[in-house]
Amino acid sequence: MEIHLDSASEHVVQASLTGVVRESGPDDHPLDQLDIPHIHSRRLLLNMAGVKMLNSNGLGWLLTCNKRCRAEGGRLVLHSLPTMAMNVVKMMRLNQVLTIAADEQQALQLFAETQP
């Protein structure tokens, strides 16, 4: 899995995931590669359009990211999931836990609706 920073502001971080989404290891958190302080306390938008495969470890990583964001006062929104990835998420019923938007515009709208 590769993660690329698309943009970052004080409150919103936009990044793109490509390749096979999987957890790298217990001590290696992919979001740390972005080198953004307190990333989980921000609104985090992950573009999933470049994802080739989403395995169970990748789902676990996304759930961990979501949990950490909530615990630290941030929010995680996934968008532009390929059909294959969305089918896996739905099959595991994780669409009831994760916030998923159809595209970037809808994801940004979700953030706008929930601004303090």
Image (cartoon, grey):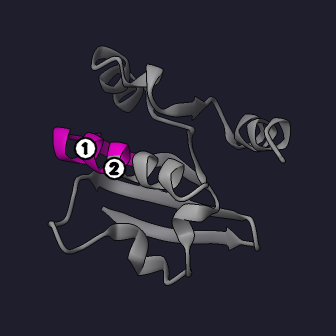
Residue 19 is left or right of residue 98, and the answer is left
Q: Quadrant of residue 86?
A: top left
Residue 37 is left or right of residue 84, and the answer is right
Alpha-carbon span between mark 1 and mark 2 = 6 Å
User: Could you say where residue 34 lies in the image, as x and y percent from the top left?
Assistant: 49, 78
**Mark 2 Cα-neighbour bin, 10 Å: few <14, some 14–19, many ≥20:** few
Tell me whether the residue at label 1 lies in contact with that at label 2, contact meaning CB atoms closer than 8 angstroms: yes
User: Could you say where residue 40 lies in the image, as x and y percent from the top left?
Assistant: 52, 63
User: Could you say where residue 109 lies in the image, as x and y percent from the top left?
Assistant: 81, 37
In this view, 36 is above or below 53: below
Q: Residue at x 48, y 52 (%)?
A: 71
**Local SS, label 2:** helix
Query: What is the span of residues highlighted in magenta in the rendered image?
Result: 51-63
Q: Which residue is mark 1?
A: 60
Residue 59 part of the magenta segment: yes
Magenta-highlighted stretch: main secondary structure?
helix
Going by the numbered disc 1, the residue's amino acid type is: Gly
Going by the numbered disc 2, the residue's amino acid type is: Thr
**Local SS, label 1:** helix
Q: Quadrant of residue 102?
A: top right
Q: Residue at x 53, y 59 (%)?
A: 72
Q: Which residue is mark 2?
A: 64
Residue 62 is left or right of residue 36, and the answer is left
User: Could you say where residue 77 lies in the image, as x and y percent from the top left?
Assistant: 58, 43
Q: Residue at x 67, y 36 (%)?
A: 103
Q: Quadrant of residue 104?
A: top right
